[in-house]
Structures are given as C-alpha cells and as structure tokens.
Image (cartoon, helix red, strand yellow):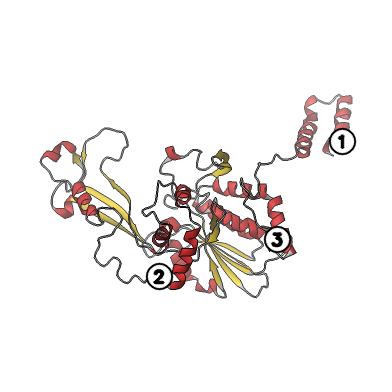
Amino acid sequence: MHTIKYIPLVVLAAGLGFAVGCSSPSVEAQKAATAKAQPKPKLGIRPAGDTEIQPDMTKISSDELKKVYSYIDEHIDEHVENLQKWVRQPSISNSGEGIAESAEMVKGFFEQLGCQQARVYDVGVTEWGAPGNPVVYAKCDYGAPRTVAIYWQYDTMPVTQPDAWTQPPFEANLIEQGPYKKVLIGRGASNSKGPELAYWNALMSIKAVTGTMPVNLIFVAEGDEERMDIGLRKFVKDHPDLFAGADALIGEGGGQNPSGSAGVGGGSEGCVYIELTTSGKAWGRGPVQSDIHGSNKRGVDSPAWRHIKMLSSLVGPDGNTPLIKGFSDGMEPLSAEELAGLKKAAEKMDLKVAAENIGVARFIAEDPLTVLKMQRYGLSFNLDGVWSGNMYAGGAGAILPNKITSKHNMR
C-alpha cells in the first residue's frame, strides 16, 4: 500500500529535476512495507512442549474454556516474548539494579489487564532501618462475587557465578538443552518470573476470549523477596485496607515436572535469617583492629578457625542434623490427611528425575516419602555463605583475618 502511494511521487520528482535525496522517504516507505509484508518468523515452540504432555480436552466441558486453551496455543510465541522482555530487565534487590524500572514494568502488566487501580508504592524506611524496595499494587474489579489476591515477587538473586551460566543471564535466549528442544535461559526464568508470566498470560487470554474475568483480582508484587520481604511486610502493615474483601490468596506460581505432574503450592515455610560473627576484638585474641599478614599465624590466634570450629558444633557429622538445643521443640506431627497426601505424591515421584530438576546429585534420603516429608515439613539449618579475609579467587596473598561472618537460614 505504501509502495503504490510513493512510487508516482518518486517518478514525478525525478521528472522535475529534484535532487535524488528527495526520494529517500519513498525508499524508507518501501522498506517498511516490505518488512510489514514479511510474516514474522516463528520461535518454533510447541504449545505442549517437546513431549506429548498436554491437557486432556475431553475432560473440559466448557466451550469457553476450550477457546481459552486454543487462544493460548495460538499466541504461544507472544507469551514467550512477554517473558523474554521481563527476564531481560534486571531486578536484583540486594544491589538495587533495575528495581525501579522493574516496578514500573510490573505496573504496566497490571494496567494491560485493565486494572482500575495500579500504583507503585514507596514503602519508605522499614523496621530494620533499611529502605524497602517499591511494592506494586493493583486492583481489578470485574463485578464478580469473589475476589482473589495474587502475590508476586519481581526481584531476583544476583548473578554470583557467571561462569556457571551457559547463556548470558539477562538475554533470555531460547536454546536447545537436552533433553529439551527449546528452553529459555535467564535470571528469574524459573524463580519466579516464568511462573508469574504464565499466570499473567493465562489471565490475558481469558480476558481476550471472554472480555472479563470470573473473579475480581488484587495484585501485590514486592521487590524484596530476596531480602526477607522487608518492604512487603511494612506495606501490608501500613495498608491493610487495600486487601479488604479478598477471599483467597494465591502464591507466585506453580510448576510442571517432565513426567507431566503439576501443582500450585498452598503455602510457604517460615524463614529466619541470622549472621554469626567472630572477631578478634570481641574474642580478645588474634587481630583486633584489621586483617594482618598471614605469616603472623605462627604466633597469633585465628578468629576464622575459631569460627569454623564453632560452626561444626551446630550440626551433626552428617551436616544435616541440627544440634542446637530446643531447635525442634514444638514441632507438630503430621495429620493423617497430610500423611495420606504425601504418600499419594510419593507414588508418582522419581527421585532421580526430581534431583535432576533442581541440579543435585541426590537427596539426603533414598525413599520418596521420606524426601517429601523432609522437603515439605522438615526443619533445616543452612549455611548460606561465609566471608572474611582474602576473597579474591585465584589470587595470591597471605591474610590472617581479624573478623569472619557466616550467614544462615533456618526453615
């Protein structure tokens, strides 16, 4: 259409002796028209994945719901591209990288759903003295009798092991990675931007097909999940009225295993973070003001070794059994209903596949039921990391640290 419009103008301009440069708009228009005429290349993604796992449509009685499923399949490339855009936006809460931009991006998602309210809240300084990252809130009133609140996190962990990435963490590349023909690699792709965008794409599909939603929606998206939810905690305390009328809460997303089994978690564990520090100043031995040269170890005590000896006393020889007095006091036994549910899930659990899914060699136990009990109802004392002294990998330098700190989470 643009080509037909501009070609006569080019001919006319040439006939009148106009400068050649005057024809450039028509050239650009031709390029644009040619690009528009070319069909957009497909990403090559099968809606049901690289296996034969797919919904059994014979069990769906609603014609409207069948149309929603069809819409999702027809727009699968668009849905994946939405995820790619989000993964490409860094949102690292511990450093603040991309946090403000990500909050605005999430607000845009909610506005696309047609939410009447969508706002980025500055939560201010939290009870721990540190400022919280923005919370994104939205409310979508469709005139439905029920209201569901949906929780998101938009922050991710930092990239601490760049050499372990097969692809750049913020490019969201689609590659073949056995046994799958297509996988998306990127920070947050599985935790938790992928599951959340799957939610959002599904909701957008329902809206596109039906023009509305079966329930009203309240969204709350935090940027501090990786920082103990400090901003969300303050936001909920400051604005309880924003959640009035919610009948249920859904977490950040579910998942599907290679076997086809899938589910959405009904809750999450409590978590306590602590830091333990051993210093020469507090101990009264070893370096008291700053790190000193490592050659002094021949005659000076080491706070670092003292700390390591202390850590080894907190768990048993297996590294898994907490030896802290009272650690498991008050732990309630499983109900008959909970145990029955675990036994049913254990029947379908392949420990080898489950271990591969999270990138571990094996689990602590060899029995699926025991593993599920530990994972869903167990208690743990974890060592997240240790920092002290010479932290330059591969570099020379003899250091006797004056202080050492370890970080732990208990769940």
Q: Amino acid at mark 1?
A: Ile
User: Where is residue 68 shown, x and y percent of the image?
Assistant: 70, 59
Q: Which image quadrant: the N terminus?
A: top right
| Residue 169 horizontal/vertical position (percent) | 50, 42
Mark 2 belongs to which amino acid? Leu
Residue 317 can be seen in this image: yes
Q: Residue at x 12, y 43 (%)?
A: 300
What amino acid is at disc 3? Thr
Q: Is residue 144 left or right of residue 195?
A: right
Distance from disc 2 to disc 1, alpha carbons, whole Å, reads: 75 Å
111 sits left or right of 314 in the view: right
Q: Which residue is mark 1?
A: 4
Query: Quick one: 152 or 2, which is closer to the camera?
Result: 152
Reading the image, the residue beneath label 2 is 334
Measure how far apart labels 2 and 3 are at the Cα level.
37 Å
Other residues around mark 3 within 10 Å, as few (<14) / some (14–19) / many (≥20): few
Q: Quadrant of residue 64?
A: bottom right
**SS under mark 2:** loop
